[in-house]
Amino acid sequence: MQKTDSRVIRGCISATLGAMCWGVSGTFSQFVFTNFPHVTSLWLSCMRMLFSGLLLTLISLPKHGKQFVEIWKYPRDIGRVAVYGLGGLLLCNYAYSSGIYHSNAATTTVLQTLNVVFIMVITCLQTRRKPRRNEFWSVMLALIGTYLLVTGGDPRQMILSPQGLFWGLATAVGATLYTLVGRPLLKRWNQGIILGIAMTMAGIFINGVSRSWTMGITLPPVGWLAVGVTVVIGSLAFFLFLQGIRDAGPVRASILSVGEPLVAVVLGVVWLGDSFSLVQLLGFAAILAIVFLLAKDE
């Protein structure tokens, strides 16, 4: 019993730290875009995906090197890893960077939280059942929260740009895809190995397609330091959060994931000078409340 309790506590701590690391990583991305306008979301995604993948692989090899060798003997699993990396992680990371580029880290991380609604709707369709009462209200809260976030309560204007809204929702779609595609893989293999291989695949792909080495991006030391923080802290976030899911379960981890937008909001206001109206903050609260509603059903 004590061993189980200690594992759950470890999982809760891991999920909380992982969510906070995501919030920090996103805020540093916003710092890069704000202070170095020539840096594009595509280039930053290239750096994040490739170097995060390599870093996670190197961290996991000493303890799980045998799995790294073994997985290549299963072509079907490698195919799933490729889909996981290109269809889920790459979309989520690129959309996340683009959302921050066109709005800010806080807004993008809050919109990403809508992935729990998307997963719920897909689950209802797969099991051919009607949404439960809490699930119905979670959809209503998602619509209300997004409306308040976009318009500030005035339908005649858009506070959030169309690009910011599009990429924020695309981030939620990417998070939905990598969550659903990754579930069977993470049951069989170590999360660090799967994440490392998938991110490295996606990083090689996006760097090759975009020819990132021809973009000519140059940065002062503080700029490279900020990029390094987004890579290292972002990699740590994935690793910690998946460990949290494994130890504490998806319900507890999803509740604790609200730490990500909260950290992004606080850092954005205190450090980067972001400002949000009361109505927008109500929109934030409505969307974050969805996590607790769905967790109660679970």
Image (cartoon, rainbow, N blue to C red):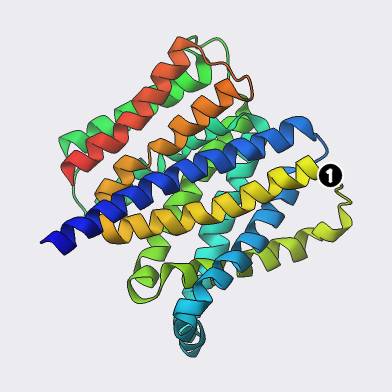
Q: Which residue is mark 1?
A: 219
Side of 41 relative to 232 (left or right) = right
Residue found 57% across the figure and 33% down from its top: 105
Taking depth in this image into account, of 240 and 118 the one nearest to the observer is 240
Residue found 46% across the figure and 86% down from its top: 66
Query: Is 24 drawn above or below residue 18 in the view shown?
Result: above
Side of 183 relative to 234 (left or right) = left
Q: Quadrant of the N terminus?
A: bottom left
The residue carrying pointer 1 sits among few (fewer than 14), some (14 to 19) or many (20 or more) residues within 10 Å by Cα, namely some
The spot of residue 287 in percent (x, y) is 37, 29
Query: Is 276 drawn above or below residue 267 in the view shown?
Result: above
Taking depth in this image into account, of 164 and 185 the one nearest to the observer is 185
The spot of residue 127 in percent (x, y) is 22, 56
In the rendered image, the residue lying farthest to the left is: 1
Residue found 85% across the figure and 48% down from its top: 217
Taking depth in this image into account, of 266 and 97 the one nearest to the observer is 266
Residue found 73% across the figure and 30% down from its top: 34
Q: Can residue 125 be seen by looking at this rendering?
A: no
Circle 1 — which element? loop
Taking depth in this image into account, of 215 and 128 the one nearest to the observer is 215
The spot of residue 270 in percent (x, y) is 57, 21
Q: Can residue 248 be seen by looking at this rendering?
A: yes
Query: Is 103 drawn above or below residue 52 in the view shown?
Result: above
The spot of residue 89 in percent (x, y) is 54, 57
Side of 128 relative to 63 (left or right) = left
Side of 261 relative to 205 (left or right) = left
Give the tally of numbered discs: 1
Residue 114: name its quadrant.
top left
Amino acid at dot 1: Leu
